Image (tube, helix red, strand yellow):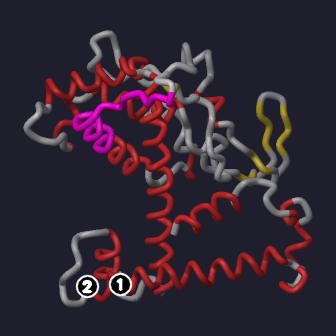
Amino acid sequence: MYNCMCRLARAALPGSFLVEFLPIMKYLPEALAPWKKEGNEWYRKDTAMFQGFLDEVQSKVNPGQAKPAFVAGLLERNSGQLSKAEASWLAGTMFMAGSETTAAALTVFVLAMRLYPNVMKKAQAEIDAVVGRDRLPTFEDRDHLPYIQAIVKEVLRWGPIVPLGVPRRVMKDDFYEGYFIPKGSLVIGNIWAMNHDPTIFLDHDEFRPERFLDETGTVNVTPADTRNQGHVSFGFGRRICVGLNLTNQALFIDIASLLWAASIEPAYDETGAEIVPSAMELLDEGLVV
């Protein structure tokens, strides 16, 4: 599953294949187009993998053993509307899109807590005051944990994991601030630059959740044109990430639970010197970092 996600992330990166610059190459037979053969083989292997996962859930749905989950509900309500391949790819792509991105965002969170321990301590103080030590945080606590909500926004703003977004093609000729953009042009949204725009985000390179709260620390404040997200990491328009609500909820409960249970402490090298991780080093996986 992870290999499939990595392949898709790399394949979706503009310029990955020569055919993108020479569209006539798409008419070449598979024997003369290695990228076609490779893509078809990926599709066959990944389809078999996804259908295997689907069959495993199906074997539990029939006798009523399946726990409540997306795939179980899909199988129970499908009624032939989707083919087996369609249903398996629907479930598979949802899992890949949600797992890779959420895991990467949590890595950014851990890095931020290591570099900004004052933020971590402030968040833990809020959790201790609202939740206490006798139980884990729940979604019912969300409205009473504004600083944790602000941390979620700042994680996605400060370290967008898809820094250049998903490439788009222009549907018709357009003009933008004096520039002519012909129909069919490839447009890449610089998510990183927008999230670090100094005219909108003062001290934009600093991890500061307070930027999303008013003076009382209780009222949500977000820049205009961000759909109340505080950033543009989910994209734009009709093709905005359909999983944005799921991502926000998952990051909230994960971050709240991690801070409730643990602190992110420094590591030390063999000489006893504190190891300070870089805020800029990253692993490039194509669209996702």
Do residues under tags 1 and 2 come within 8 Å of each other at their CB atoms?
yes
Disc number placed over residue 209 in the picture, else none:
none
Q: CA distance from mark 1 to mark 2?
A: 7 Å
Q: Is 269 drawn above or below residue 104 in the view shown?
A: above
Q: Of 152 and 79, which appears nearest the observer?
A: 152
Q: Of 85 and 239, which appears nearest the observer?
A: 85
Q: Position of residue 77 (x, y in %)?
A: 30, 80
For the C terminus, the image quarter is top right
Q: Is 236 drawn above or below residue 125 in the view shown?
A: below
Q: Can residue 225 be seen from the camera position used here?
A: no
For label 2, the crowd category at 10 Å Cα-Cα, with few meaning under 14, some 14 to 19 and many 20 or more, is few
Q: State which quadrant residue 277 falls in.
A: top right
Q: Residue at 70% of width from left, 52% of height from top?
A: 168
Check disc 1 and report the residue beneath it: 56
Q: Residue at 87% of width from left, 63% of height from top?
A: 18
Q: Of 86 and 116, which appears nearest the observer?
A: 116
The part of the chain drawn in magenta is: 252-270
**Is residue 264 shown in magenta?**
yes
Check disc 2 and report the residue beneath it: 60
Q: Position of residue 169 (x, y in %)?
A: 74, 53
Q: Of 45 and 197, which appears nearest the observer?
A: 45
Q: State which quadrant residue 267 falls in.
A: top left
